[in-house]
Amino acid sequence: MSSDGLRSSSSIQPSPDSRVRSAADRQTGDNSELMRSARFRKEREADWQRLETLVLRAERNGLQRMSFAETRDLASLYRQATTSLAIAREISLDKALLGYLEALTARAYLCVYAPQQRLGGLFQRFMTEGAPQAMRRSWLYILLGFLFLGLGALAGYLLYFENTDWYFVFMPAELADGRGPDATTGDLRSVIYGHETGTTGLGAFATYLFSHNTRIAIFVFGLGVFACAPAIVLTFYNGLILGAFFALHADRGLGLDLAGWLSVHGVTELSAICIACGGGLKLGAAVLFPGDRSRVAALRHAGHDAVKLALVAALMLVVAALLEGFARQLVQDLSSRIVIGWGIGAIWLAWFTLGGRRRN
């Protein structure tokens, strides 16, 4: 081989001395990085430990039980830790230090900025402010829910008197047997003022009506987002059942008696249906008429109040179940039934109209 080839070959292959120097340089760089991380940590470690202590105390006891000085230090040290994290990322310190700072700042963030109310406080705020304010903001949609239910009841009532066969069209088959146009007036009266608690008579109807109305409430809220139509149809259909059933008793001169029987739990239960319908309509209106917002943004904005309406409806259905299970059976006097049902309705109305108003 020529001398030029030998020189060329030797220039390609690094010498043992250069390889040793390269390894030494890498070792020096690693040592320098470790020293820099150690120095960075040593200068700030006391503040991090203090922050970690305050975070543990806040997580265990809550900010309410911490002193003013501790909460002030928590906020200040949190800001310092976020600055340290940004610097550590910028100068590429070791991963262990970065992981520690990321975890610490995330926990501190939750302590400083996350809501500090416990479940009881959130429930109290919902009952005193959130729910009634959402009801007032959504009054038009709730009124529409009452309107569709009322129109359905009126249609069922009038169609029954046009042709009694409509009763079997609207009324579920499992409840129509024995309580249709062929039933005697005495039989209808006996179940209104009877003490039966089994699965016959109006007890069965009340049980079915509650479970049926609960499903309706869920559906009218959940399906209202689809252009409002399902919520309107289901609420109207629920009114058809109520109207036909009331017409059957009114035809026998028992309309007022049935109204008293229904008032005990029906005022609360049917109002819950209309409120759930209002929530569904509000979601559907946000999709149909988003205004200046995008449909997603409009739906998100409407959802804040709509969800509260759904929670109010659920609460009212629970109360209606208690009234149906106890007061309906224990109270047999017509006037007392009306007073109980509409009195509780007045309490709901007072809560919705007066709750959460700020005093000037």
Image (spheres, rainbow, N blue to C red):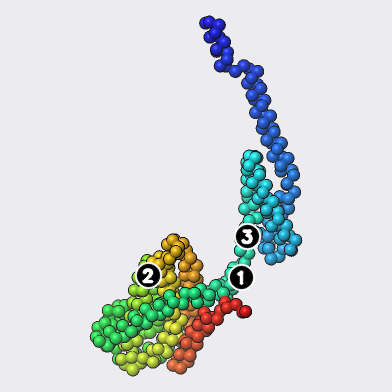
Question: How far, Cα to Cα, is label 3 from label 1?
Answer: 17 Å
Amino acid beneath label 2: Cys
Q: Position of residue 28 (x, y in %)?
A: 68, 29
Residue drawn at (68%, 35%) of the image: 33
Q: Position of residue 3 (x, y in %)?
A: 55, 6
Indicate which disc, 2 or 3, sits on the residue closer to the N terminus.
Answer: 3
Amino acid beneath label 3: Tyr
Determine the residue located farthest toward the front in the rendered image: 292
Residue drawn at (68%, 63%) of the image: 63
**From the viewer's perspective, is residue 100 above or below residue 347?**
above
Question: How far, Cα to Cα, is label 2 from label 1?
Answer: 34 Å
The nearer-to-camera label among 3 and 1 is 3
Task: Label 1: state its secondary structure.
Answer: helix
> Which labelled disc corresponds to residue 113?
3
The 10 Å Cα crowd at callout 1, few under 14, some 14 to 19, many 20 or more, is few
Left/right placement of residue 165 relative to residue 311 reads: left
User: Residue 203 occupies which quadrant of the picture?
Assistant: bottom left
Name the one closer to the observer, 137 or 23.
137
Q: How many marks?
A: 3
Residue drawn at (31%, 77%) of the image: 172
- The answer to whether the residue labelled 2 contacts the one labelled 1, judged by CB atoms less than 8 Å apart, is no
**From the viewer's perspective, is residue 120 above or below residue 37?**
below
The 10 Å Cα crowd at callout 2, few under 14, some 14 to 19, many 20 or more, is many
- The answer to whether the residue labelled 2 contacts the one labelled 3, judged by CB atoms less than 8 Å apart, is no
Question: How far, Cα to Cα, is label 2 from label 3?
Answer: 37 Å
Indicate which disc, 2 or 1, sits on the residue closer to the N terminus.
Answer: 1
Check disc 1 and report the residue beneath it: 121
Task: Label 3: state its secondary structure.
Answer: helix
**From the viewer's perspective, is residue 217 above or below residue 53?**
below
User: Residue 34 occupies which quadrant of the picture?
Assistant: top right
Amino acid beneath label 1: Gly
